[in-house]
Image: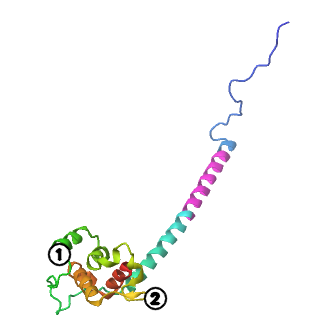
Amino acid sequence: MPIITRPTPARRVSATMEPGSVAHILVLLNRMEAYMADQTRAMISMGKRLTKQEAAVERLEVLLASRQPLQPILPDPDQENQMPETSLVDKVIVDAINREANNEAHFACLLLPHVFPELFGVDKLRLLFNWNGAAAKQALDASRKAYVENMTKFFYPDARSTSVWTAVVMRIN
């Protein structure tokens, strides 16, 4: 007995529309309507992004308008631009520390073991001392503190500012 199978179509069978027919025009109108809806959604999305950008620009303009002009740091007339004459640390060592340091706080921290060698020994006395003697600790020697401050301000003139020097002291502590 021969096996009889149904023939399967090679491609989808659909009704053909002739250009210009009412059905063809309706299909085109539906496609145009979908395209216009997509464009409308895209425009709304772009409008929202534009509104966010405009708000950000307004905030930046307000910040620029309220910005206070910066005052240049002027050196004190009584401070000369010469290395302090009293030298607790050899000039060669100070120059090497200056080359190694990244900023004024780093310079001061690198200079401290040379100015206060007793604090950095085996006894760990540095845990008992503080720059200003705060937090139930003892204050450091005033003359050697002045040397560290003068050397730091000599190599880093920005440290003459009170806020910068406060940050340096915080790093030292």
Instruction: Give the answer, above or below, for where 150 lies relative to 56.
Output: below
Residue 53 falls left or right of residue 70: right
Alpha-carbon neighbours of circle 1 within 10 Å: few (<14), some, or many (≥20)?
few
Q: 79 left or right of 48?
A: left
Give yes or no for contact between labels 2 and 1 (Cβ–Cβ under 8 Å): no
In the picture as drawn, the residue positioned furthest to the right comes out as 1
Q: According to the image, label 2 marks what residue?
A: 136
Give, as a single range, the part of the protein colored magenta: 25-44
At horizontal 22% and vertical 68% (from top left) the residue drawn is 99
Name the residue rendered at 15%, 87% in the picture. Answer: 80
Q: In which quarter of the image is residue 77?
A: bottom left
What element does badge 2 sit on? loop
Find residue 98 and report its horizontal and vertical position in percent: 22, 72
Few, some or many C-alpha atoms within 10 Å of disc 2 (few <14, some 14-19, many ≥20)?
Answer: few
Instruction: Indicate which disc, 2 or 1, sits on the residue closer to the N terminus.
Output: 1
Question: Quadrant of the image for the C terminus?
Answer: bottom left
Q: 58 and 133: which one is in front?
A: 133
Task: Residue 147: name its quadrant.
Answer: bottom left
Task: Please name the colour scheme applied to the rendered image.
Answer: rainbow
Quadrant in the picture for residue 152 = bottom left
Image coords of residue 87 (percent x, y)? 17, 82
Q: Where is residue 92 in the image (x, y as percent from the top left)?
A: 16, 71
**Is 18 placed above or below 56 here?**
above
Q: How many labels does the image show?
A: 2
- Amino acid carrying label 2: it is Ala
User: Predominant secondary structure in magenta?
Assistant: helix
Q: What residue type is labelled 1?
A: Asp
Q: Residue at x 62, y 57 (%)?
A: 37
- Residue 35 placement (x, y as % from top left): 59, 52
Could you give the CA–CA distance between mark 2 and mark 1, rounded to whole angstroms?
33 Å
Pointer 1: what residue?
A: 90
Secondary structure category for the residue under label 1: loop
